[in-house]
Amino acid sequence: MTGRLVIVGAGQAGFALAAKLRALKDDRPITILGSEPELPYQRPPLSKKYLLGEMSFDRLLFRPEAWYGENDVEIRLSTPVEAIDRPNHLVRLFDGSEIAYETLVIATGATPRKLPAAIGGALDGVFIVRDKADADRLATVMKPGHRLLIVGGGYIGLEAAAVARKLGLEVTLIEMADRILARVAARETADAIRKIHEGEGVVILEGTGLTRLIGDEVRVKAAELSDGRVIDADMVIVGIGVTPNDQLAADAGLEVQNGIVVDGFGRTTDPQIYAAGDCVVQDWKGQSVRLESVQNAVDQAEAIAAVLAGGSAPYDPKPWFWSDQYDVMLQIAGFNLGYDRTVVRPGAREGSLSIWYFKGSDFIAVDAINDAKAYVTGKKLLELGKPVDPALISDPELDLKSLLA
């Protein structure tokens, strides 16, 4: 191949695409455009081991700088893209320069939602966690004894709570819904995770929203909650979801529906432009979804690379996800969208369990809490498409491996 591939975005999907193409011996010119000043790096450890000081930043890099030269991959850092000129096959940068492409891949990820300025979201001491700069700012104030308010009871908020408690902060987490993890997990999973956090000293207030943050005109000092109470807060972490970075695609006239719409091969409505990762909305068993995970970003990017290198197989998502909180490993296989029944199965170790999701008679997902055997078995069953009898799952005497026979 001789036509240049330009990748907009130097995150997990953008890097995985370039690396897979080179692994497939595709020698077309590749240029990666990254808006951050750092080489591509892993994001999940930023809010965990990196923030705890257990992992240096160089260990987060996907590859050292030399890899890019050795593999003939041009990477431009601190290079935000202003626009895509589709008729002329050009990417226009904010410095006014342009790059021609034969094929373009948009891998711009997503941006955490912020609190409105009208309720104090612009005060100092209010944080989101998405990139290295966010983590570095947060590290300067995550000190023992500080009072932290976390807004949002999803995985981001809960992981932040675990790190903060390890660092000795006083933590209060509020969730507007009637329970934590309401959008992404069953009540049984939420109950188990809540119990773990409360055992570590986190105050969790469910069915409780934020009315406003109170500051001294500069920095946050307290928060007024929806139930009328006012609590002291030296800092706030916001974990209320993300918004796909799809404006670049929308401005270029590509189809966007809360994410860049792609077909089974990762193609947008322009056959020379592909998209991958958190910025994408794709088909999942007849429904349009965004799969926000490292696994999906990598797998989708590698599937696109295979197509660009001459393959013809569509991307078949097989979601899996994990979350580290304290000494607890939550592992998820499948996608529980539309589930109507769950089966809880105790694990072999004290405190371990798994929650199995069914939609009608179909097994669709499993949450495993410190139960690797349940996770591995459930994931394999999903990959094989094997039927699962809920009654068997509920039998604690059953050897899960027998389901794979």
Image (spheres, grey):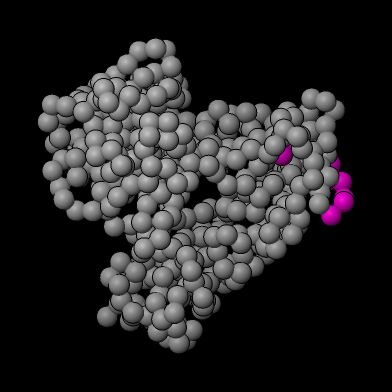
Q: Is residue 323 visible?
A: yes
> In this image, 161 relative to 110: left or right?
right
Query: Can residue 277 be seen in the rendering of this structure?
Result: no
For this orientation, the residue located farthest to the top is 96
Who's the residue at 65% across and 54% down the image? 153
Q: Position of residue 169 (x, y in %)?
A: 73, 43
**Residue drawn 37% across the image and 60% down it:** 284
Give the x, y percent position of residue 324. 53, 53
Q: Which region shows up in magenta?
A: 227-236
Q: Is residue 404 above or below residue 128?
A: below
Q: Quadrant of residue 218?
A: top right
- Asked whether, in this view, residue 216 is left or right of residue 287, the answer is right
* Residue at the outermost right position: 229
Quarter residue 373 falls in: bottom left
**Where's the C terminus, which quadrant?**
bottom left
Is the residue 22 above or below the residue 367 in the image? above
Question: Residue at coordinates 61% horizontally, 65% vertically from top-left?
Answer: 190
Q: Is residue 112 above or below residue 77?
A: below
Say if the magenta span includes residue 373. no
Q: Nearer the viewer, residue 252 or 279?
A: 252
Q: What percent of the width, then of the height, locates residue 256?
A: 42, 43
Q: How many marks?
A: 0
Tell whether position 230 is magenta: yes
Figure quadrant of the N terminus: top left
Q: In screen coordinates, is 23 left or right of 291? A: left
The residue drawn where x is 28% and y is 38% is 270
Q: Position of residue 183 (x, y in %)?
A: 57, 60
